């Protein structure tokens, strides 16, 4: 049995490789996402160089290994029988030292050659930069645009214009990481520090991303969507949203419910309680009680709304009061508290 172990290992490795390639093909293939910023193409070239070298090395290791396993198998020989005793082979030893050194040198040279040119933005468009404040929070992304408009999870940016994200995490929070592969780069959001992520997206569309730093129980739910819009459409949206949020009739409250609360809680009629209690089964009925718990947290619930502006808090309390009120009145005795 022990002698069959190498063959079994080779078969297992092959099967794992085949399965993982298949799985990767299902989500868009082994290639990285199509770049939509100027420098992300250079990152892609480095990826391809590494992939090709890796594939060649893999072949040169796995094929001889499989051959030796087959050719040198027992064939009924006695276990005591010794094979040929080989001592030293200068040429072979020089070869297996030199080849990896040369390969690593090629990789280093290519990366050093490419790295200075990797800019996710460019000088030409940097003159009219749009700055957006981004805050990573458990477990959502909060955006504040220059005119004060607030967004949750979905970031909207204009195509062809340099965008500068002032990236941080809320003071009482943990480290998150803003990662949208199509934009290139991955940037940590650290409490108490601000870091610039500057890019110019060239192609309108919606690009998915995730939080790239394990940050707690709902880390996996902390997704990002970047919607790259035509410049005019973006300007119209920003202006319209500003008016709606000032007037208190935007969908900000719903965005907050979806992005901030619903990752752990459900309302009545939305199935079993989730990570936290179902809101209809709590004492939350009015704006004051909602604000208190959202600002300060409670038990294992973090202060998800600590530092929120009145605009943000009003949007959520208005939305939730409307969602909860009919149930409070109609629910009568079923309200367990
Ligand atoms: Cu935020 Cu993981």
Image (cartoon, rainbow, N blue to C red):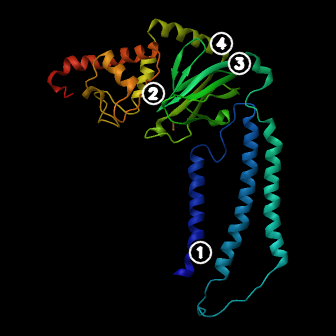
Mark 1 vs 3, N-terminal side: 1
Q: Position of residue 11 (x, y in %)?
A: 58, 69
Mark 4 vs 2, N-terminal side: 4
Residue 18 tag number? none
Tell me the quarter of the picture where residue 120 sits: top right
Per the image, the residue denoted by label 1 is 6
**Tag 2: Cα neighbours inside 10 Å, few (<14), some, or many (≥20)?**
many
Residue in the picture at 69% in, 89% down:
83
Locate the C terminus and report the quarter of the image it occupies.
top left
Residue in the picture at 47% in, 15% down:
309
Per the image, the residue denoted by label 4 is 232
Examine the rendered structure and indicate whether residue 216 appears above or below residue 3: above
- Helix, strand or loop for disc 1: helix
- Helix, strand or loop for disc 4: helix
Per the image, the residue denoted by label 2 is 259
Q: Rounded to the nearest whole Å, what is the CA distance between mark 1 and mark 3?
A: 58 Å
Mark 4 vs 3, N-terminal side: 3
User: Mark 2 and mark 4 in contact (Cβ < 8 Å)?
Assistant: no
Per the image, the residue denoted by label 3 is 129
Mark 2 vs 1, N-terminal side: 1
Q: Rounded to the nearest whole Å, what is the CA distance between mark 3 and mark 2?
A: 27 Å
Examine the rendered structure and indicate whether residue 221 appears above or below residue 143: below
């Amino acid at each position: 049995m022990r002698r069959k172990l190498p063959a079994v290992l080779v078969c297992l490795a092959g099967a794992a490789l085949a399965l993982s390639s298949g799985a990767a093909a299902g989500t868009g293939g082994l290639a990285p996402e199509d770049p939509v910023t100027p420098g992300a193409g250079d990152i892609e070239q480095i990826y391809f160089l590494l992939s090709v070298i890796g594939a060649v090395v893999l072949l040169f290791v796995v094929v001889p290994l499989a051959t030796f396993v087959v050719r040198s198998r027992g064939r009924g020989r006695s276990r005591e029988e010794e094979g040929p005793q080989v001592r030293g082979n200068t040429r072979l030893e020089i070869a297996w030292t030199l080849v990896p050194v040369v390969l690593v040198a090629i990789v280093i040279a290519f990366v050093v050659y490419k790295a200075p040119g990797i800019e996710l933005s460019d000088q030409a468009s940097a003159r009219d930069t749009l700055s957006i404040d981004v805050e990573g929070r458990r477990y959502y992304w909060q955006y504040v645009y220059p005119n004060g408009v607030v967004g949750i999870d979905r970031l909207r940016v204009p195509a062809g214009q340099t965008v500068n994200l002032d990236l941080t995490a809320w003071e009482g929070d943990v480290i998150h990481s803003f990662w949208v592969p199509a934009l290139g780069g991955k940037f940590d959001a650290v409490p108490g520090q601000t870091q610039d992520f500057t890019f110019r997206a060239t192609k309108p569309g919606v690009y998915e991303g995730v939080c790239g730093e394990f940050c707690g129980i709902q880390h996996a739910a902390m997704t990002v969507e970047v919607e790259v819009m035509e410049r005019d459409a973006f300007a119209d949206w920003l202006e319209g949203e500003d008016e709606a949020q000032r007037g208190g009739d935007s969908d900000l409250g719903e965005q907050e419910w979806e992005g901030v609360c619903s990752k752990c809680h459900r309302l009545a009629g939305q199935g079993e309680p989730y990570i936290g209690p179902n809101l209809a089964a709590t004492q939350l009925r009015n704006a004051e009680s909602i604000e208190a718990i959202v600002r300060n947290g409670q038990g294992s619930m973090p202060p998800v709304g600590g530092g929120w502006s009145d605009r943000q808090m009003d949007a959520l309390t208005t939305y939730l009061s409307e969602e909860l009120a009919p149930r409070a009145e109609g629910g009568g005795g079923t309200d367990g508290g």
